[in-house]
Amino acid sequence: MAKNLMNTSDKSNFILNMTEEQYSKAASLGIIAACLSVSLFTIPPEINKEMTYSSSTFGLVIPGVFCMIMALIAIIRKFIAGKAIFSACAFGAMIGWGAVSMLDSYDINIGFYGFPQRGEGLLAIIFYCCFFITAASLKHQKALKSVINGIILAGIANSAFAMIQIFTGEFTHYPPLLTNLDFAASGLSQSPIFLAMTLTLALIAAMVSSALTSSGKYRIFCLASSCIFIFTMIYTFSLMSLVGIALAVIFTIAAAVIRKSPKKALLLMILPAASGALALVLCFAGIGSKSSSYKLLDGKTLWTFDSYSRISSSGLYDDRAVDINDTFDVYYFLNTKTIDIIKESPMTGTGPEQLVYPQLYTVKSPTGEELKSVTDIISNNAGTFDKVYNEYLYTTATRGIPSLLALLCMLIPVLCHGFRNTKIAVEPENAVLFFVTLGGALIFLIGCSNITFAPIFWAAAGASCVCLEKKKLPEKKETESNS
């Protein structure tokens, strides 16, 4: 008999009467939207330069609100996987301490909504928690596979748009960095490095799936997607792309060994490798490349064109302090200076998305004019930056050491449960989701959270806690016979 609350109708009590199957179908749609919507909402500002990237944040809000409802239903109905409860509580603790950090920050408004056109304030973290809980409450193989397909589709959407940028030079905020250097494709991820991060997750999902799936058609789809992803990643001219490709290869081999996949599945990995080689050949041939060579452009990409030119969230780099053409020097400078900022406020940090504020030293332009706009003030402070490309350091610097501890308490159990699920689950989806989550956790060492990448990562992390264990067949009863 259907449950009712205070004599209301059955239809109005859909939460009480929702089955696990109904929940999984609705929740999986929300997760697919979380993977895709930010990228789709980034199309207008990429095409129309008069628009700002603030429109991209709507792509986070819409699935965020939907998954907030689904997360509440999961908690009320106790759908959430038992293995994910501790991590969900740790996520809640990180949100709680983030609120403390926000109240003690330079700008409470930015702390809650995020820096304009970045959009990763406390509200975004709440949405990420809802994505995690919603994905951790999925109960069926089809629902888990929909998460994987959503990740791959996000990669396809970004790669398709990046191809237009690569071969036409249009619809991009990253023109040639210098007359003799390349521009980097950003796809629909707002930054070439963010694109490389997003495609890393998509590549891992596609390559591991191709090695483990028993469906020939799905293997072809995953291999074709992998070829597209690697080709596009080469054109981001970033360290992240090289690391992402290496992780995908290592994880695919590891997954095949753990799941005892046939060797021919690994031999097919030569196709994505050939795609990457083709991209390099084209770069040296000057196709989609201005310099007929291949150079890592992380420094100028993340500093000059992303934060400084695109959204005025930092000053221009100071060439007296950092060699912008030396990728190692750029990351070393960002990390060491961030550690100094952490020492100044280790408990509450600078406040969400406010890493640049303690670095500001002048409110005047080079001509001595008093500046009133915050973005004008920030862009006139040379040597400042708003992102450190190490999420663990960034979390500590902006929201304090307690937030870092909560993040680790959240991720470590997820990875442990995901690895266990990889070995015991009857279907390959658990293995795919575990390696996607592991890849995201590792690239956080040289990357930072952003609204394109993070929803995909946290959805995969939540789904990796759901185990489709191999069900034991009922034992046959011995029939007595007196033959």
Image (spheres, rainbow, N blue to C red):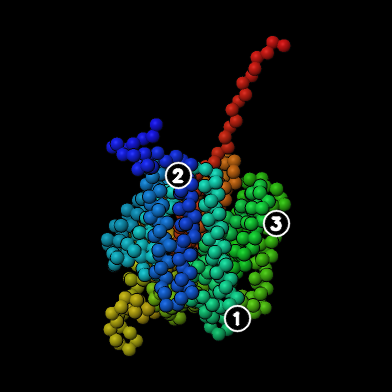
Residue lying at 68% horizontally and 51% vertically, measured from the top left: 216
Q: Secondary structure at mark 2?
A: helix
Question: Tag 1 or tag 3, which sits nearer the N-term?
Answer: 3
Residue 353: quarter of image? bottom left
Foreground residue among 29 and 108: 29
Residue at numbered disc 1: 290
> Dot 2, crowdedness within 10 Å: few (<14), some or many (≥20)?
many
The amino acid on which the numbered mark 1 sits, given as a three-letter code, is Lys
Residue at numbered disc 2: 23
The amino acid on which the numbered mark 2 sits, given as a three-letter code, is Tyr
**Mark 3 → mark 2, Cα distance in angstroms:** 37 Å
**Mark 3 → mark 1, Cα distance in angstroms:** 32 Å
Residue ranking furthest to the bottom: 367
Left or right of 50 in this view: 163: right
Q: Secondary structure at mark 1?
A: loop
Q: Position of residue 336 (x, y in %)?
A: 43, 68
Residue at numbered disc 3: 268
Mark linked to residue 345: none
**Mark 1 → mark 2, Cα distance in angstroms:** 51 Å
Q: Position of residue 62 (x, y in %)?
A: 40, 58
Mark 3 or 2: in front is 2
> Dot 3, crowdedness within 10 Å: few (<14), some or many (≥20)?
some
